[in-house]
Amino acid sequence: MENDLVDILVTTFNTEIKYLTKQIDSLLCQTYQNIKIYISDDASNDIRVKEVLIDYEKKDKRINIFLQEKNVGFVKNFEFLLKQSTAPYIMFCDHDDIWDKDKVKISLEQLKSKNVDMVYCDAMQIDSEDNLTQKSYMKYKNLPILDGKNKKILFARHTILGCTQLITKNVKEKMIPFQKDVIAHDWLSVVIANQEKGISYIPKPLLKYRLHLSNIYGGRQLDKNIEKWKNQNGSTYQDYLAYRKYVINNSYKDGAKMALDYTIKSENIEIINKILNYYENIEKSKFINFNILSYFRFLYAKGLRKRIFKEIVLFHFPCFRIFYF
């Protein structure tokens, strides 16, 4: 297995140096050594980021640094790195996490043993001071465990963090070049793997996923995202409806549109169109939408737990939020 090269793709932008060095050091300390690390800096304003990256490149021949001349955004930056990758296996990496030393090894072993196009793992969650805040990202976020292929839920919602994934070159080749509706590289990889040889879950946290107070989404729960929105935009019922519309579009519907662009099988196209119709209908509802059956048809999976109630209120009974928004 050591003959199989694994490319690790990292994007940076104004990363705090103390986090950046911890992340890169955790990659260099992997027990599986046959790796190449591609790092693309997205035109950071902090010159120290570039200096640190170049210094790492000089110290270890497995590191390849790219410096973007202008800011292209994280989606296009990951597309750029995918185009540089030549290995049969690829992993996405955030710029400020800390990987377990066996993350690459365990991920590759499972991918080969299960003969799938993607594996993903659980993660611990840490704060800006490296304090452990959650032992399991999956349990904290009430996320379902998804093994197999052609699962409707993976067209309808984003459930798998990019930094937990290992994908095959087959998936990568079908991802690039990105089409215009790609909203997240790590949801796109899931959409494609789901329609190819499938996905397998590793029930073990293989990294420490860092959540900062400034994170827009990250590991924050629904109630905390709502509180953040209220603080920034207001707390009237109209403010809540604006938040609801934003979430439906940016966190759900836009992902389904992206999935449609990358889907060939007629049965999956039919499913995604029904998902899009569902999102369009609930978006129009300002007080109550009784089509709850569609929620369970497209978005339900075992393991969602209390997320189910919160999403049903968000999607189907927004009027209830007037009492506690």
Image (tube, rainbow, N blue to C red):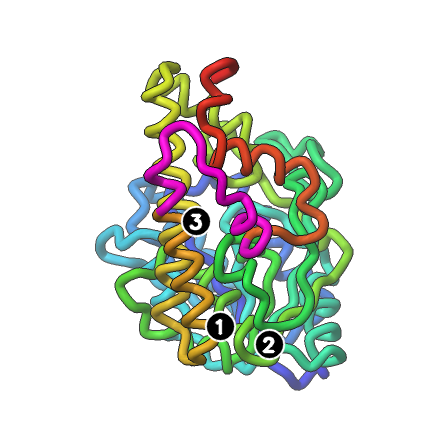
Residue 62 screen position, x and y as percent: 53, 71
Q: Which of the two marks, 3 or 1, is nearer to us in this view? A: 3
Residue 133 shown left or right of residue 273 in the figure = right
Name the image quarter holding the N terminus: bottom right
Identify which residue, 116 or 172, lies in the foreground.
116
Given the image, on which type of amino acid does mark 2 rest? Asp
Q: Residue furthest front?
A: 290
Residue 192 bears which disc, if any? Answer: 1
Asked whether the residues under the numbered discs 3 and 2 touch, taking CB atoms below 8 Å apart as contact, a structural biologist would say no
Identify which residue, 261 or 190, lies in the foreground.
261
Residue drawn at point x = 54 percent, y = 56 percent = 298
Secondary element type, mark 1: helix
> Does residue 65 appear in the picture of this structure?
no
Residue 117 bears which disc, if any? Answer: 2
Secondary element type, mark 2: loop
> What is the magenta range?
281-298
- The residue that label 3 is drawn on is 252
Q: Earlier in the sequence, mark 3 or mark 2?
A: 2
Residue 292 is inside the magenta segment: yes
Q: Residue furthest left?
A: 70
Residue 246 shown left or right of residue 288 in the figure = left
Asked whether the residues under the numbered discs 3 and 1 touch, taking CB atoms below 8 Å apart as contact, a structural biologist would say no
Residue 158 screen position, x and y as percent: 51, 53
Secondary element type, mark 3: helix
Q: Is residue 100 above or below residue 192?
A: above
The majority secondary structure of the magenta stretch comes to helix
